Amino acid sequence: MRSLPSGFVCLRGCSAISAEQHLNTSANIRLAAGSANGIKKSWRSRLFAILGGVVCLSGFAAAARAGGTAYYINNQAGSNCSDGGPHSLAQPWCSFAPANKIRTFLPGDQILLARGGAWNQELSLGGRGTATEPIRLSAYGAGANPKILRNQQISDICVLLTDASYWKVSDLEVGRASVGILLHFTQLFNNGISISNIDAHDNKGIWAGYSTEYPVRRHVLDPFASSLNINLSSGILFNVASYLTYTNAQYVLRDVTVSDVRGTNNLDSVAFDAETNSIDNQDGHNAFQNVTLKGLILSSDNGNASRAYEAAGLGCSDSLRLLGMTDVTVMNSVLFEEAGCRTGSGTAAVILGRVSHVTFVNNIIFGVPATGSPDETGIDFEWSEDHVTLQANLFAANAGPGVEILNIHPGDHSSELDFASNTFAQNANAYRPGAASVWENNKGRGFGTPVGKIRDNLYFEPHGRFFGGKSIGSIANVGNLQTAFVANYAAEQFSATQGKNQWRYLYQTPDSNWEEMPHYSATDNGAWESKPGQYVSAFGMAPGSCTAVCDASGVARVWVAVHAGTVSIRGLVVAAGGESGTSVTAAINLVSGRNVIPIWPRQGGRPLVEAAEQLGTATDVDNIHVAAGDSIRFEVYGSSNGGGDAVSWTPSIGYVVNKF
């Protein structure tokens, strides 16, 4: 992708959103190669169960904190609201005008919007909470999350937070604006932002700083976009004032969590946009630090959605934009059918630039469409990436490469890359820029040469090579295995029906026997359950609590072999949230008839997965011989410290070529 002009976990989910609202169904699953359109239909049908229960989009009433003031806003009939009233439950404000007038809120304050309410106003807030008393913008009452829906004008914003520190924003629907939620920073050293349970849709209109009123052909940036340094419209946007500078030792925002977000029909759904270098020329990867993104479900982000946008030259470059960041984790997320319009500078589901120490683990990136654009890739390594890890993800049915590494900018570099234990399937079907799962390109002498290792991945790529590009040989290619069919990636094949897609979901009874979980809840928690707190979901597994001996509280997802052959397993088991707490242990067993054969770990007992440890434990195993009807059981147990914390674990199983 060329640079633009100028400058769960909600593991169990909550209420479901029907995938059929966003995708055309396909009755059959096709595992063999086919047309690009047929491939996309095949993968659409396989994603429905995940999308039905992986994201939280409803919640409970927020309780006012004793340490601050609660400001209630409710414009619904019968609310007794008054903008001149006491902003209480008995007499809330009607509109955002009084809150906008206060603007600067104090530690412990809460701005609470009534569930079931809807507003067409900008909510413009500021203030600095503390780690122990954050400021909250959330919802109260029962019903649908409050809606802030604008008029689709360039100057429309739903929520503007300026120089926010220690804020928690949750339980909102934002849409029909240029930006849904904008966190705009004009000063350094901000901290502690949490955003959760947000539905962001139809936020668009600004691309590369241009708009329909200021089209690309005029070469004059939209003044409203320039006033807030908005490069691309977004559902949720973190950005930096154009005049703010910083050195490599400084930061703009640190300690951020964005979780359980549904983004559809935006330009970008989630964006961190700090595109400029630091003033000491140290790459500029330090603006946003220590960021966790989890439980994102982003789809159909195609900001070029009307003839007016096309006429203005506006594109839809990407959906998840990560620029100017260090220490970032993206996990348990699904991006599908992103960047769905022709864009001359290229398209990608995810773009990386000026980033360091970034990890993608246990995600699905699927179906970037063929639009005649350059790239059309799952993840675009656009410029200046250092220490980027992709582990145990699924890249499938992207028109271009699953991953594209570019060194096309002066001073660029791609160093210490590590792509391990991922699954690649049916990518590069449009041959732009080349037919390979992992594609590298640079401008030759004087431009950066990528350095790193691509290892132990599974791939099924009937349209081309796994590994290709001008300088791809500079990256180590170690232990990557071709599969005879598309590998069985657990999260992608998760189902509300036991046994569907060759997967079953089990729990341990008090006498340590394994039985099928009796209950699946799509609206409550999007998981198979045996009892509250003991579940298996698309990405997550949580054993029951236990003390001392933990051999009768386990949960398992089980893959059943449909025919004999030799299979390989790839995966990573990692703590779901990274918070301090209890731990779990994990194991993989082959069940053949009455025999239970340990296959991971081979010896030494079940490894402990610490709750506060985010590196995870690889669960890769090769040369497993299975007969038809054999099963492979992926087991998680509580630990003797009283634990039953959730882990993220979505193993992938593939029949290996020439051993089938």
Image (cartoon, grey):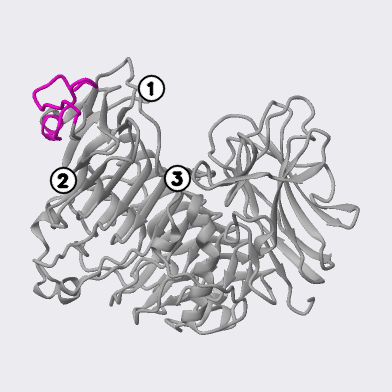
State whether residue 113 is above or below residue 354: above
Element type where label 2 sits in the image = loop
What distance separates the C-alpha of mark 2 from that of mark 3? 25 Å
Residue 322 appears in the picture as rendered: no
Question: Which mark, by number, is residue 132?
Answer: 1
The region drawn magenta spans 78-100
Question: Which mark, by number, is residue 181?
Answer: none
Type of the residue with mark 1:
Thr
State whether residue 338 is above or below residue 573: below
Element type where label 1 sits in the image = loop
Q: Nearer the viewer, mark 2 or mark 1?
A: 2
Q: Are marks 2 and 3 in contact (CB under 8 Å)?
A: no
Which residue is located at x 68 percent, y 74 percent?
A: 483
Which residue is located at x 23 percent, y 26 percent?
A: 72
Type of the residue with mark 2:
Asn
Would you name the residue on which mark 2 appears?
Answer: 120
Q: Nearer the viewer, mark 2 or mark 3?
A: 3
